Image (tube, rainbow, N blue to C red):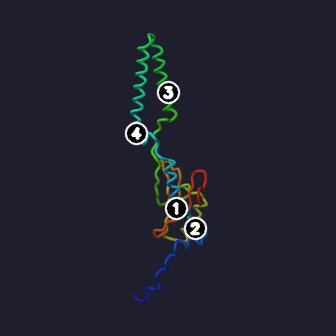
Amino acid sequence: MPFDALIAPAAPKPLALLLEEHDIAPVPLQALASHCQAQLDRFAPSFWYRHQTWLPVGLIGSVGCMAASGGLSHAMMSDPLPSSWLSLGWLSVMALLILFGVFRVSAGARWEERWVGLDELRRAGVPEPIASRARLLLRAAPGAALILGELKQEEVVLDPYLLFERDGERVCLGIWDDRQIIAL
């Protein structure tokens, strides 16, 4: 139709112009990427998780060593009491190693992203300065989305961030942890 151009909706503002109008300086995506990698390195899988086949070998081997040391000391001494004390000592050492987490098996952390709505920001633990930025941008850009990235280790959220996305463009609004805002 000839008059369709007169009623066509206005093209949305570019994301950079929208951020500039609201005086918001996003966290650079390179800084977010380096932060994500640093956190993955920090919360890497434990030695025993990476070498799971060696854990049963080590534990069974230690029981074998306990039995061998008890048997050897029993054969060398006429009194069986020292061999019992040696076996009990070895068992105590292994129990302490397990108790203090030397044989802890923890998986590495992983990043997960999910869409969140404005009403979910408080429940997700988004700090108020970051949440207010998100509300301001969503009011100014209908149809945009918020993406919450979470570093999870065994279902515990360690280090989240919030992204604003519109038309395939993403900007990071902030990174935080339980104690403080890391980047805003």
User: In front here: 45 or 156?
Assistant: 45
Outermost residue toward the top? 78
> How many marks are shown on the rendered structure?
4
In which quadrant will I find the C terminus? bottom right
First in sequence, mark 3 or 4: give its number. Answer: 4
User: In front here: 114 or 174?
Assistant: 174
User: In front here: 102 or 113?
Assistant: 102
Is mark 4 in CB contact (under 8 Å) with mark 2? no
Q: Which residue is mark 3?
A: 93
Q: Which residue is mark 4?
A: 52
Q: Please give the name of the residue rendered at 52% of the width and 57% of the height, measured from the top-left corner.
A: 34
Cα distance between the residues tagged 3 and 1: 47 Å
Q: Which residue is mark 2?
A: 136
Q: Please give the name of the residue rendered at 54% of the width and 63% of the height, measured from the top-left corner.
A: 28
Outermost residue toward the bottom? 2
Q: Mark 2 is on which residue type?
A: Leu
Q: Mark 1 is on which residue type?
A: Gln
First in sequence, mark 4 or 2: give its number. Answer: 4
**Image coordinates for residue 177, horizontal then vertical, percent:** 57, 52
Q: Which residue is mark 1?
A: 30
Cα distance between the residues tagged 2 and 3: 59 Å
**Image coordinates for residue 127, horizontal then vertical, percent:** 59, 57
Cα distance between the residues tagged 2 and 1: 24 Å
From the image, state whether disc 4 or disc 2 is nearer to you. Answer: 4
Q: Mark 4 is on which residue type?
A: Gln
Q: Mark 3 is on which residue type?
A: Val
**Image coordinates for residue 73, horizontal then vertical, percent:** 44, 16
Q: Is residue 61 above or below residue 166?
A: above
Is mark 3 in CB contact (under 8 Å) with mark 1? no
In which quadrant will I find the N terminus? bottom left
Q: Please give the name of the residue rendered at 61% of the width and 69% of the height, measured from the top-left corner.
A: 23
Q: Please give the name of the residue rendered at 54% of the width and 68% of the height, measured from the top-left corner.
A: 138
